[in-house]
Each structure stands twice: as C-alpha cells, then as structure tokens.
Amino acid sequence: MKIGFIVILLVAVLVHVYVLWHVYQVLPLPVWAKWTVVGLMVASLAMLFAGFAGIYDRMPLWLASSCYNISTSWLIVFLYLLIAFVLLDVGRLCHLVPKEWLCCNPWTAGAITAAIAGLLVCGNIHYNNKVREPLTLETSKHLSKPVRVVLVSDLHLGYHNRKVEWQRWVKMINTEHPDLILVAGDIIDGYLRPLLEEDMAADFHQLQAPVVACLGNHEYISGIDKSLDFYRQAGITLLRDTTVAVGDLVIAGRDDRSNGHRKSVAGLLAGVDRSKYIILLDHQPYNFEDAEQCGADFQFSGHTHEGQVWPISLLVDAMYEKAWGPYQKGNTHYYISSGLGIWGGKYRIGTRSEYIVATIVEKHS
C-alpha cells in the first residue's frame, strides 16, 4: 500500500514538473514573469493540500472559500494543460508541429490560454444551469394516487456551494411541489464549518416536502458523528441500513460503502411490505443485481458525477456498469444521477448538473 502511494505521488510530481516546464518554456515573457506564473500555479496546488490538512477551517470564511475555488479549479486547468502539451509534443515528435511552437511563442500561449478560459467559462455557465430530468415510473402495485418525487444527489454543500446557492436550489425544488424529496448521499462536501457558520440546516426546513436520505462517502470524510448531527439539525430522515414507509412507498436506505459492515440489500429488504413500491437509496452504484434479485422496484444512486469534466467522464464510464442515467435490470429500474452539486471547481464540461422529477404511477392493464 505504501509503495503504491509512493509510486502515485512520484508520477503526480513528474507530471506536474512536465506541465510547469512547458508553461515556462512557451510563455513569451521575461524570466521573472515566467517564474511568477509558475509560482502562482504551484501556490494553487499548495492551497489544495492546505485544505486537506484542515487549514481552511482556521481561515476567514471568504478566504477559505476563495482558496478552495482557486485550488480545485487549478486541477481542471492542469488537466487541459497536460492534454494540450502532450498533443503538441506528439505532434512535434511526428514532425507535424514545429519546435518553435513550444518555445516563447505568443500564438501557442495565447491559443492555449483562450481555449482553457473558454472551456472554464462555458463549463461554469453549464454547471449553474441545472437540468430538470423528468422520469415516469410505472408499477403494477396499487397506488392511492400518482406520487411526485424529486430525486437529488451529491449536493456537496461547503466552501464552494454556499448558502445563497443552496437557497436557490431549495426554491427550485419547491417549484416542483413534490410529495417527497429523496437524497442519495453527499449532502456535505467535506468541510462542515461553512454549513454550520451559514446555518444551512435551517434552509432544509424550508423544503415543502419530507426529506429522506442515505449517507454518502463525503459524510464520512467530513466526520461521521458531526455529519449525523447536521442531518438531525436539518430535519432529514436519515436511513442507515433502515427503511421507512411513506404512504404507498417503502424507502430503504443503505449506509455508504465506507462502512464495511453495512447490511446487504437482502438483509435490508428482509421483511418489508412487498405490496408497496420499494425504492432503494444507495449512494455508490455498484452491484445492481442485488436490488434486482431482492425485488426492489427502483434504485436511486449518485456518486459518479459522471466524471464532472471530459475526458474524466470517459474513465468513469469505463469504471461502472452504468455511470449515469436511467437503467434497467429485470423488473428493477435504476437512475444514477450526475449530481445537483459538484466536488471542487464549479465546471461541467461534457457532463451536467441535474435533478430528477419522478412521477410514480399505477399501470392499468
């Protein structure tokens, strides 16, 4: 394990050196200005590790928020710089790109800067324009009336998704007039301090429908005991390997995979009323066959973010049986959400931030 970590760290350092060296080489600036740009990039990376070390919680809230946004945005800038320089180097080795393009070249530097800036601007606009995904779920089970459910996951409230943004989402959800709101984990991003300082729990009480949720891995990252306290303050019905009946529905919520001793789906659904429509909340979308074999009607998951930005989305698609969208195995329907919020820099490039408005209706023959 330690050897693997050392190898990963070494690769990360070498890749950063590769990118920063190319940045230094391509900039048509005086030496002091080149070093200033490289220094700012290194500082952005250092801010990220400062967050992991808990230093943000000792900063003024505005400064911690700025550092979080700058450092996590750098990761996306770095990704696209890496792609650009690899392509240019491959082109140079294949004698398609002149060597001069990579050395003190205002056109190359300008093109790369403009392209990445354009991606970030468009990505931020796309992130802020939440996609409303309608979903109709038919069942042969008896329903007293159609049930309207708003499904969200991965809010990641914290230093970047602050109170004002969360209040906007609350209004957006209330506009749907749901009978029930289901959250598939990761309400908290990783730092509880901004949620507590801005009293975001109070805004959960403004939601005009009961809120039922399961935990995500970020609640464990934030500190499970403090996360549970926040859920209680917010008035959320939290399901940790438990079930609750809501009208004609049974909602079953699994604890996150972070808990290695959580119940199996079979153990969780043992003894539930099978005449009711069964919804399974499971933050991480693994082992879909479990829900199918145990007779769940519908499973809602999140976690993947669909990779957040291209081409990470391609890797995420390869990692999961289904990384985003509707799915079906046997008689069980699934929806894996790309998330309403996001971790890190607020950019959606090739993916989307969404909320699902599901209508559960009785199917008549």
Image (cartoon, rainbow, N blue to C red):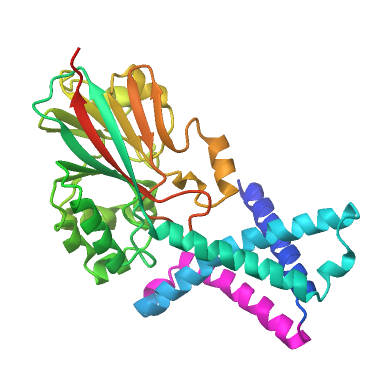
Residue nearest the viewer, comparing 247 with 221: 247
Point 38% across, 42% down: residue = 337
Residue 52 belongs to the span the image colors magenta: yes
- Image spot of residue 164 (x, y percent): 28, 68
Asked whether residue 276 is in view, the answer is yes
Q: Main secondary structure of the magenta part?
A: helix
Q: Nearer the viewer, residue 297 or 4?
A: 297
| Residue lying at 39% horizontally and 66% vertically, measured from the top left | 160
What residue is rendered at 71% in x and 85% in y?
33
Q: Name the quadrant of the C terminus.
A: top left
- What residue sits 33% from the left and 60% below the top? 157
- Residue 253 lies, in percent from the top left, at 26, 36
Along the horizontal axis of the image, is 17 left or right of 198?
A: right
Q: Name the spot of residue 54 as percent of width and height, x first.
A: 43, 68
Residue 36 falls inside the magenta stretch: yes
Furthest-top residue in view?
A: 365
- Asked where in the image residue 30 lies, by quadrant, the reply is bottom right
Magenta residues? 29-57
Q: Quadrant of residue 245?
A: top left
Say if residue 345 shows up in the picture: no
Q: Is residue 66 above or below residue 254?
A: below
**Residue 256 percent coordinates (x, y):** 35, 41
